[in-house]
Amino acid sequence: MIDLLGDLLGRATRAGATSADAFVVEEQSFSAQVRLGQVDTVKHAREQHLALRVFVGPSMAAASTSDLSHESVQRLADEAVSLARITSPDPLAGLPDAADLARAIPDLELDDPTGHRLDPEDKIELARRCEAAALEFDPRITNSEGGDFSDRQARYAYATTHGFGGAFRTSSFGLSVSPLASEDGKMQRDGWYHVTRKRARLESPEEIGRIAARRVLRRLGARRVKTVEVPVIFDPDMAASLVRHIAGAASGPALYRGASFLLNRLGQSIAAPSVTIIDDGTVSGALGSRPFDGEGLPVRPTVLVDKGVLSAYLLDTYSGRKLGLPSTHHAARDGSGVGVSTTNLFLAAGVADPADLIGSVKSGLYVTELIGFGVNGVTGDYSRGAVGLWIENGELAYPVEEITVAGNLLDMFQAVEGVGNDLAFRDRTAAPTLLIGRMVVAGT
Amino acid sequence: MLARPERFFEDRFGLTPSVMERLLGSTLAGRVDHADLYLEYRINEELALEEGAVKKASRHVSQGAGVRAQSGERTGYAHTDDISLGNLEEAARQARAIADQSSTSAVVPVGPGRIPHDLYALPEPPIAADLSRKVSLLKQVDAAARAMDPRVRQVIATLGSEELVVLIATPSGWTVGDVRPLTRLNVTVIAEDGGKREIGGYGGGGRVQFDFFFEEDRWRRFTAEAVRQATLKLAAREAPAGNLTVVLGPGWPGILLHEAVGHGLEGDFNRKGTSAFSGRLGQQVASELVTVVDDGTIENRRGSLNVDDEGVPTGRNVLIENGILRSYMQDRLNARLMGMQPTGNGRRESFAHPPMPRMTNTFMLAGQDDPEEIIRGVQRGLYAVNFGGGQVDITSGKFVFSASEAYLIEEGRVTAPVKGATLIGNGPEALTRVSRVGRDLKLDEGVGTCGKDGQSVPVGVGLPTIRIDGMTVGGTQV
């Protein structure tokens, strides 16, 4: 793969590029869905993608293709260079300094070659067991959107004209199920999942199925509530969605465009002192880890929010130069160029037992699902549809739905009154249970 | 770009009709209920302007094939982006493996049926238009936006152009192809006043040529709208929270239909009984003022298709007629299993995905009322005219859509602009509270993208001005 990239970069240089970088991804994936015990859909896939970014002096352009033939690779180089002739020169555009490139490529245990050696029938069986555990859990669970098993293995390589070349492999394995429960003619759906880089670490299908069953059952009989301003507790997955909004606003491209509510707030308090947010791409075996970023820079931990104070932005080389700061090695690639992405992003665990957080609320909302796109990244204004449980006198009393939660992300993070001790790395972004002192819940 | 997809794939990959027939026939025939081969070639170009300069230009080519075999409720799907006979044979074997235990004996022959439409033949497809003209359009947008209001701080303008060639082949030797152009101009503006910043966005496009943006000065109107929205929001006050009478403006607020009823009427969810609308055909699900159609046959629209991704010509399908649920949107699989006809709604994001029932252009037919009179009749309420995205839980029926431009209605008059807020409702109930339908049906400008199960496809929506007697508005003003 590195040879292919070397060949492409050579062609780009001969076509007129003054510098360039390129990456290639090859992946193979499989997924099986079982619904009501029967195989529903099985998918096999093989994909490849070759992407090139060129600089002709200070002008930049990108091109990509899924066709790796010689003819196509030459066309890719020619097209990228000719596109660069129509873009405006930008003196800050360019590759990172060669001195900053990763020198070694750490083995972060991101792949599991033997894990993929499993017959399709056995993979289907995992999905079947996962769904069966949910369906058998309770007679009110009457239907299902299916149990799913998927696995994917990929090879990624990246190279630049100024000397970087690196490659790594990744694996992932996922199991999920979405059961439906019904009562009094009303249906509810919920689900649970687990994703890992090592198949042996996948939770048992029965455990995933039972958790999904408990989640859907607790939604039965959901009511609406009156519009009111109350404390709101976000469960760990929903709290993680709040952390993603902070990372989005702290990302370099949003900042230099002035499209962020965190603009000019570096060094300022943006959250309660109990809030610390860290991004760390070096965690062995973790879903968001990578040995180098999308520009070949070494990955390292970044403290984004330190005890409530915004202590870093998330930057690639270009957005860093725009802001007069060094890259934080968060470059991410797609076929159109370079952006910013987090790796393993988390809000650090606090000391509170989640049950005590619920116990501290006289009347309030415990959020278990959020829908919609009502987040304004420029102002931080927040308004989303919610599903959850109503808290009465410190107890989860009854399920609620068809309500919204609204506030402003800056106010919400300042109003964090409790951080749970239940941080678990189930996904690339993680958070413990969070108690926010006051938000508006709209209902009837 | 070649006008004939059959020749395109034959010339490029040597896939003659007889090769495809042999591939599907020898590996699949006699064992499955349905099988097809889908070939795709896509060129995509994106230009992006920010800070007054076109800094990003990119071009992507992707090609691939998907082979599908179905037996009963089972689907086997395999895809590859290396289109060679050997790879396709391997994909066919993988797809078949899953469907091998078919109880039936033969492939149901799929005939051409209705003739494909011809909705977007263009003298010059947008992908072929001169790059320098595209660059200068983006620069015009930037200059115009900055000249319109001194509070404009940032202009981000993007122009995307695409050409997609597809070919669908079945074992009976029948093939159908389509060449689909698509383009979209988006303008995002950030305005600042006294340390306060806001964002506004607008855009449009369709299966049209590049000159579309110059007709009727569209590019200038899109730009002016983005500027107007950003600057208007600088003065917006807190949105109200709670149950309110809501008046939706015409056009893009049709996203209400897409979320409240559209997804819930897709055949797969109803075949599986997972939709809040399952088993409700013939029942009243909306006020009798409400007729909703999904129409993939409107010329040059973003959501239109000559044939769907299973080769079925699109149609004008009445989903709800005078409040009564009339039909679901179907692909071949779900139509067959439900004993219904395919409706031309089998769509996929690309060769990497099997098709499923999806919307095309979904809108409510015009009514009798004067839009201004609809507003005059409201004592206190919310007038929402522009929206961001929406989402629905098809099982519980709960849906949201987020207003990006809305005003208070006080004593029959539109008054103060309010901040963005999410509106939430229950699909099977929300449209029963529609009490006024305006005569001003408008389709959106051509920017919609719908996501389902990880697949994105271009769609359209439309709505006349309507009044809904009671919906939950997720503001912060209690």
Image (spheres, coloured by chain):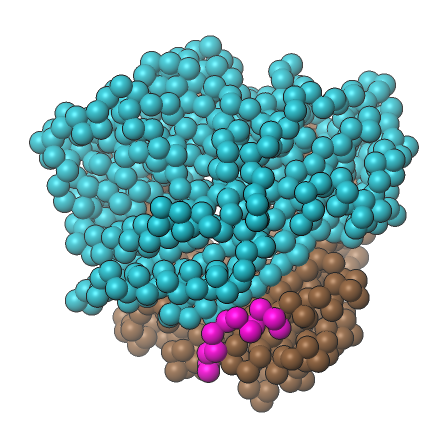
Which tint is chain A?
brown
Q: Which residue is at the far bottom? A: A99
Percent from the top left, x then y, of residue A369?
42, 42
Q: Which chain is displayed in cyan in the rendered image? A: B
What residue lies at 82% left-to-right and 18% top-to-bottom? B104
Q: Relative to B263, is A263 above or below?
A: below
Using the rendered view, name the quadrant where residue A48 is placed: bottom right
Q: At 65% from the left edge and 62% from the top edge, which residue is drawn?
A: A64
Q: Quadrant of the C terminus of chain B?
A: top left
Residue B146: image x %, image y %? 28, 65
Vertical side of B376 occupied by B218: above or below: below
Inspect the magenta stretch and tell me whether residue A52 lies in it. no
Q: Main secondary structure of the magenta part?
A: loop
B235 vs B67, left or right, is left
- Whether residue A85 appears in magenta in the rendering, the answer is yes
Q: Can residue A2 be seen by looking at this rendering? A: no
Q: Residue A124 or A155: which is nearer the viewer?
A: A155
For residue B222, side relative to residue B65 (left or right): left
Question: Which quadrant of the figure has residue B170?
Answer: top right
Image position of B14 with respect to B155: above or below = above
Give the residue at the far left of this rendering. B411
> Residue at 30% of width from left, 57% of height from top?
B199
Q: Which range is magenta?
A: A81-92
The residue under the point 85% across, 19% down is B105
State how many labels appear.
Answer: 0
Residue B341 image point, x, y percent: 63, 17
User: Where does the image place residue A175, in percent across and percent down from the top left?
Assistant: 64, 44
Q: Residue B290: in sight, yes or no?
A: yes
